[in-house]
Image (cartoon, helix red, strand yellow):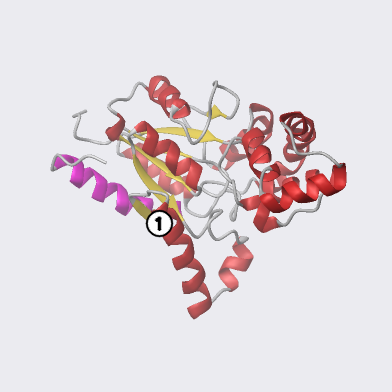
Amino acid sequence: MSENQLKAVVFDWAGTVVDFGSRAPMGAFVEVFRRFGVEITIDEARGPMGLPKWDHIKALGETPRIAEAWRAAKGADFTNADVDAIYAVFVPLNAEVVTDYAELIPGAAETVASLRARGLKIGSTTGYTREIMARLTPLAAEQGFAPDTMVCAGDLAEGRPGALMMYRTFLDLGVWPAWSCVKVDDTEPGLAEGLAAGTWTIGVAASGNAMGLSRTEHDALEGEDYLRRYIDAERSLYRAGAHYVVASVADLPDVIDQIEGRLLRGERP
């Protein structure tokens, strides 16, 4: 395969290939903080989405409003020890519910099959831990999504928004240079991961965290209401550095064609 051709596509999981609206982690974040005596909202929980879950909890606890609520409830500032305590409860809680949100996003299996037919390898990275993914991956495989490799939060010394998980993916897949790969993600840290590694990046707007709607809620939106929500989501992903933004993975093949055309002209991300 020529250096000027794509070799691999690396997918995020929740909100990108499974769990329309990336809802599984949100309820778990709200519930785990409630168990520790602090109420947070779904919108607050979504803010750091895409980070490894320990980092996500830390980011939430350091949010000014939540930090103040924590001080009021606990009489002390939020610390890394608190992150550890919350994380220990969060991981099994998220693992319990993740199977309820394991349905593939429409078009995901067909898109991956079409990419494989073009000779592309399929990688994946996720902010979920191995413990959580052990419950999710068999259900995804039954529906037609089984990547060639998967790198999870906690596998390496550093996760998103750094590049290490992508570097491990390159090694596992045997692909290089970085610009022969595409990262597909619905979150800002996930896109940052691809950018840090030097890949093309494609943001997913409608099915992911940026819109944050279940499939039923998404399908019920019409006209200007839908357009406004979608444009806001699209803009947030472009601001995060996405080279392209699609509604869902079902729209990916046309963008892959465009990227391959740019590579053949000698362009780089």
Please provide percent x and percent y for residue 36.
Answer: 85, 42
**Is residue 119 shown above or below 47?**
above
Helix, strand or loop for the magenta stretch, by majority? helix
Is residue 174 rendered to the left or right of residue 64?
Answer: left
**Is residue 40 shown above or below 177?**
below
Is residue 262 rendered to the left or right of residue 129?
Answer: left
**Is residue 10 shown above or below 253?**
above
Which range of residues does the magenta coloring cover?
248-264
Place residue 216 in its image quadrant: bottom right
Please provide percent x and percent y for residue 160.
Answer: 51, 34
Mark 1, secondary structure of its residue? strand
Q: Is residue 37 visible?
A: no
Please provide percent x and percent y for residue 65.
Answer: 71, 53
What count of labels does the image hold? 1
**Is residue 263 shown above or below 84?**
below
Quadrant of the image containing the N terminus = top left
Place residue 114 in its image quadrant: top left
**Residue at image x 59%, y 58%?**
212
Residue 125 located within the stretch drawn in magenta = no
**Residue at image x 47%, y 65%?**
232
Please provide percent x and percent y for residue 137.
Answer: 61, 34
Residue where numbered disc 1 is placed: 246
Quadrant of the image containing the C terminus = top left
Residue type pointed to by label 1? Val
Label 1 crowd (10 A; few <14 / some 14-19 / many >=20): many
Q: Is residue 232 visible?
A: yes
Front residue of 37/206: it is 37
Place residue 163 in its image quadrant: top left
Name, please, the residue furthest toward the bottom: 223
**Residue at image x 22%, y 35%?**
5
Residue 249 located within the stretch drawn in magenta = yes
**Residue at image x 44%, y 67%?**
231
